[in-house]
Amino acid sequence: MYLEREAYERAGLMGKPHGVKGKRGAKPRWIVEFDLTAPSMVPGKKGFDRLVYASKNALAQPITWLFCNSSTTPDPDPMSQHALTDCTSKPEISESINAVIPELTPDVGFLSSTSREDFEDFATSLYEWLSLVRLQSPRIQAGDQIDPYLSRYQVLDGGSEGRLCKISWQGFLAPSWTRQALIDIVTTLPHKAWFSFSTTTFSKGLAGDNAECIILRPPNSSGEYLMWEVKYHE
């Protein structure tokens, strides 16, 4: 649960402040976590009874709960009595995207301390391109003729034409599922093939701020990876 100060104090549950100390803003919030599958989550146990009391008294307003079932659903489903709305995340596949692909392998010279700025420029440009691919922006498509008054984006160093395939899932996905998906990609694709894998958290504010992680394996580099980690702090 992601609670404001008033709700947190009224609930009387144990939690921890959200965000980095000194950057929690004028309305600090607290994160309260319960593992409902733990052996202690049964009637009569102190932690369970406290959660039930808080739900009936302090947190009495109707709220939407989001559950992630990353394994096989038991039969009968113990959650069916609560009139659940099932949301199944299915892959969206976009094949044969005719795109302009930049150089994906960093220059060896970037590894020297004197070329750090060059590497940062390369990494930033590549991150921008990967983000546009995720959005399926026309700016990365071959033959794009956007008016330069509207957009001046160009693929770094011109790039070369190629075909891409994008597979995406959208929904409440567990970290364990994401980790296994990455493992499956690494073990299934040819070791000389390149791929990019990205995951994004839910937004926690009206501004749409969230955290994300992108992993890129350059072509012909089976044991080498680039990673971008974007963190969000309130």
Image (cartoon, helix red, strand yellow):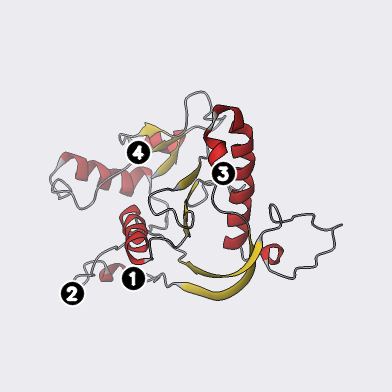
Q: Which residue is mark 3?
A: 107
**Residue 5 screen position, x and y as percent:** 45, 33
The amino acid type found where label 3 is placed reads Asp
Tell me which corner region of the image, top left, top right, bottom left or bottom right, holds residue 30.
top left
The mark that comes first in sequence, 1 or 3, is: 1
Q: Which residue is mark 1?
A: 83
The mark that comes first in sequence, 1 or 4, is: 4
Query: In terms of secondary structure, where does tag 3 sit?
Result: loop
**Residue 32 screen position, x and y as percent:** 34, 40
Label 2 CA crowd tier, 10 Å (few <14, some 14–19, many 20+): few
Q: Which residue is mark 4?
A: 11
Q: Which residue is mark 2?
A: 75
Q: Relative to the observer, which residue lies in front, 114 or 49?
A: 114
Label 4 CA crowd tier, 10 Å (few <14, some 14–19, many 20+): some
Q: Relative to the observer, which residue lies in front, 71 or 118?
A: 118
Marks 2/3: CA–CA distance: 55 Å
